[in-house]
Image (spheres, grey):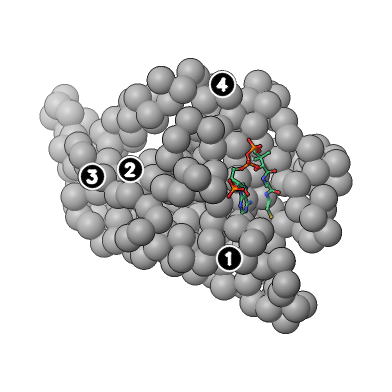
Amino acid sequence: MENILIAVENRIATITINRPSKLNALNKATIAELSQAIDDVENNQEVRVVILTGSGEKAFVAGADISEFADFSPEQGKELARLGQESLFDKVENCSKPIIAAVNGFALGGGLELAMAAHFRIASDNARVGLPEVSLGVIPGYGGTQRLPQLIGKGRAMEMIMTAGMIDAAMAHSYGLVNHVVTSEELIPTCEKIAGKIMKNSPVAIGAAIDAVNAGYVDGINGYQTEIDCFGESFGTDDFKEGTTAFLEKRKAQF
Ligand code: COA
């Protein structure tokens, strides 16, 4: 991997987008490597939680790499968005292991879209986020027009997209776009602390909960029905046996 770093420690995989000289902008190669990294953590039995962050102190990701698509045709543009969504952004959202975006600076365009595809977001107090695409004459193409209104409501999303402006960490927090705002030094430790709480719980149940929550946002799928199915399937798992037995035996469950 040339553009990302992966470290696995204490069952947490930290994936760092590592192009600081370009503010970690997502070029084609970085998207392909991230896609591979998500497959790797999904298949790595040792990994229970994933933290996704950017290298350096300035940026999480400052967007898709503008230099790569400046001369694209409409067909190439469509393909760029389709490939990105299918190969990476949807994969992040549907990963069975929790993915926490540690937003350590600018998260713009594809950067904010990547953070929004993650299961939730923690920001450092210097973070600034936005979808500036219309200032370039395009629109968000990696799910931003869909996930931003889901997370903050249609009116606020419309304003952010139409103004192409950035909001600071405090406003992102007040919008519910990020769950917590902490200092830069505390960012990764805070994510690790939350990961620690997650890891006490059943990974199988967490994967099923991710499926059920996501199902509510997919056209043509009844999220309540998915919940019923996933709930029922839980009863056939070893984790359910361990969780309920541990409760009845007044001990901590070992998942
Ligand atoms: N694509 C390609 N390169 C990018 C980039 C992007 N999205 N964002 C930043 N870079 C590059 C810059 O071109 C510059 O490279 P260079 O040193 O080779 O010229 C380097 O990263 C540093 O960026 P710079 O603009 O000098 O930093 P800054 O602190 O002055 O400004 C931003 C920071 C984030 C405000 C500014 O980089 C920016 O507006 N980036 C584009 C954001 C955007 O529109 N993203 C959506 C894309 S769809």
Q: Amino acid at mark 1?
A: Gln
Does dot 3 land on a helix, a strand or a loop? strand
Q: Which mark is residue 14?
A: 2
Image vertical order of residue 38 relative to residue 157, above or below: below
**Distance in Å between CA atoms under marks 2 and 4:** 20 Å
Say left or right for 58 vs 245: right
Q: Amino acid at mark 4?
A: Asp
Quickly name the residue at label 1: 85
Q: Nearer the viewer, mark 4 or mark 1?
A: 4
- Residue 167 appears in view: yes
**Viewer-nearest residue: 254 or 186:** 186
Does dot 4 land on a helix, a strand or a loop? loop
Q: Residues within 10 Å of mark 2 (few under 14, many from 20)?
A: many
Does dot 1 land on a helix, a strand or a loop? helix
Q: Are marks 1 and 3 in contact (CB under 8 Å)?
A: no
Q: Residues within 10 Å of mark 1 (few under 14, many from 20)?
A: some
Q: Residues within 10 Å of mark 3 (few under 14, many from 20)?
A: some
Quickly name the residue at label 3: 8
Quickly name the residue at label 4: 125
Q: Amino acid at mark 2?
A: Thr
* Residue 74 point in image, percent of width and height: 77, 77
Image vertical order of residue 235 relative to residue 153, above or below: below
Residue at 50% across / 55% down in the picture? 93
**Distance in Å between CA atoms under marks 3 and 2:** 6 Å
Residue at 34% across / 34% down in the picture? 195
Residue at 14% across / 26% down in the picture? 251
Quarter-wise, where is residue 168 in the image? top right
**Viewer-nearest residue: 223 or 66:** 66
The earlier-in-sequence mark between 3 and 4 is 3
